[in-house]
Amino acid sequence: MPAPHRSPAFAAIPSAAAGLPLYRVVKRELLRAIESGDCPPGQTLPSEAELAGAMAVSIGTLRRAVDELVAEHLLVRRQGLGTFVAMHDADRFLFQFFHVERADGRREVPTVDLVSFERLRADDEPAQALGLKPGAPVLQIENRLRLQGQAVVYDRLTLPAQLFKGLTEKRLAERTGTIYQLYQAEYGITVVRAVERARAIAADRTAARVLGVATGAPVMQVRRTALTFGERPVEYRVSVIDTARHDYVHQLTRPTRAV
Amino acid sequence: MPAPHRSPAFAAIPSAAAGLPLYRVVKRELLRAIESGDCPPGQTLPSEAELAGAMAVSIGTLRRAVDELVAEHLLVRRQGLGTFVAMHDADRFLFQFFHVERADGRREVPTVDLVSFERLRADDEPAQALGLKPGAPVLQIENRLRLQGQAVVYDRLTLPAQLFKGLTEKRLAERTGTIYQLYQAEYGITVVRAVERARAIAADRTAARVLGVATGAPVMQVRRTALTFGERPVEYRVSVIDTARHDYVHQLTRPTRAV
DNA sequence: AAGTGGTCTAGACCACCAT
DNA sequence: TGGTGGTCTAGACCACTTA
């Protein structure tokens, strides 16, 4: 009788682990399972009791490993249901990766227009950010993001062509959901975190045209490097933001919970 | 025989806690002790075993409460030494509250010049941010921050006068360490987190003069509201940043640890 | 009712720091 | 050596979800 839904196999954790605490060894094993695709995004993990049993560790140790992965947004727990590999949905996008909001504090998911799609060779800056040789083949995608109909962000994404084989303008235009959802669902690439460096610049002609601001107007430029497992860069993005009616928001330490 | 160093008293946790998990009740009790000054910044807390005993909870429950407070940077654990109420030192400043760094990624603590110090009545914007009535008495402090000798940030801080009685230009000028260290050490006010809203603006004449840039040059403006316990605002700050040679850096989810 | 994660316990032993 | 936090265990029981 074939298993209708093969459960990922977890082997017992080897005892000697080079001074690494056991719960980190467990965490690394879970990471490996997530990264390798043994547990695809959205899938239920085996229950904590099963996992602990399979890895031959106590449930407390297993839970500690899961705790860290939940804190890093790689797993999601739902009481009564199970533990899931985190998906890139609209909520996660807003919470983790989109920090532009109206001056009155209202947040919403932007609508996206594709402005251009090109295959070209990497300039120095994106190449360095992506760990590629200058001139390596890349995809360059330009998007315009609107909030309540108004153009607010002009994004230029640079992607290593090698990682996104088969990504065409057509597939991009047809996508639903966020672009990180697309990376994850279609190319098996999960963005786990990002680093942004912001500065103020004068809008050049192109940005001014796309955003409908005056050439030379002060705008924010945000350069993002998005990373997948193992700190490997998978996207370099330069965003130009019209901050006339919107802000770029940054929480310096998020409150854990109300107490 | 008087106690040379009175240990804070922790009462047993009442059993019925309105559905709140026990570890959160413990956390709230620890927060109360920190906030009330029973455990001043830098002081060693009673050991985990003592605390658990005094509150009549298991050590695991006590540790879970401490875990959250450590994650919020309110407590610091040092193996072999004890658990301490977190202090605002240079490290914490750089890590949690100062996000400007050189384009090459180097980070350093800025030097501060006091530009002006005034007592005045709050404008609408700072009043709203601080939860004060417009016109309430406030202190307004202007600082210039230098990195490697170069002026990079022009800060205007607005503080509720009521909270900082006795703060004078002289005391400010004489301070050592960060200003949050001063708030904590001299006025018993601990900044626990902050929210920043950034945008690009054209430098006005004052900012241009202080920073040594052209009037009208694009600069970043960051409006920060700093909060103490209970989400109470204690400082409103507008920073103008010359981003010609520096960036404002933002990590979208920090990696927990290397695994 | 059965299965999941969430909380809580009461220990044991280890690693680190001071003296 | 003694005291601290760090790790790990093996349970019990609760709260939530689905069926």
Image: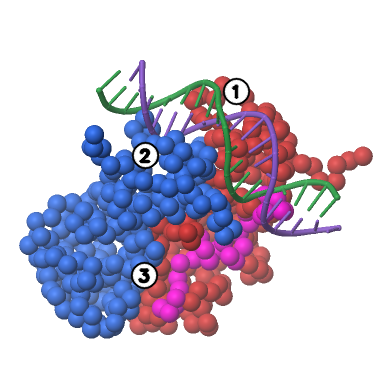
Chain colours: A blue, B red, C purple, D green
| Magenta highlight range | B78-105
Identify the subunit bearing mark 3.
Answer: A
**Amino acid at the residue labelled 1:** Ser
Res. A170 visible in picture:
yes
Q: Which residue is mark 3?
A: A197
Regarding mark 2 in the picture, which secondary structure is present there? Answer: loop
Q: Position of B131 compared to A206: left or right?
A: right
Disc number for residue A121: none
Q: Which residue is mark 2?
A: A46
Q: Are marks 2 and 1 on the same chain?
A: no
Figure check: A141 above or below B209: above
Q: Position of residue B114 (x, y in %)?
A: 56, 72
Q: Which residue is mark 1?
A: B15
The Cα atoms of the two marked residues, 2 and 1, are separated by 35 Å
Q: Nearer the viewer, residue A137 or A32?
A: A32
Q: Nearer the viewer, residue B150 or A82?
A: A82
**Amino acid at the residue labelled 3:** Arg
Identify the subunit bearing mark 2.
Answer: A
Circles 2, 1 touching at the beta carbon (< 8 Å):
no
Regarding mark 3 in the picture, which secondary structure is present there? Answer: strand
Circle nearer the viewer, 3 or 1: 1
- In the rendered image, residue A215 lying in the magenta stretch gets the answer no
Q: Residues within 10 Å of mark 1 (few under 14, many from 20)?
A: few
Q: Nearer the viewer, residue B184 or A259?
A: A259
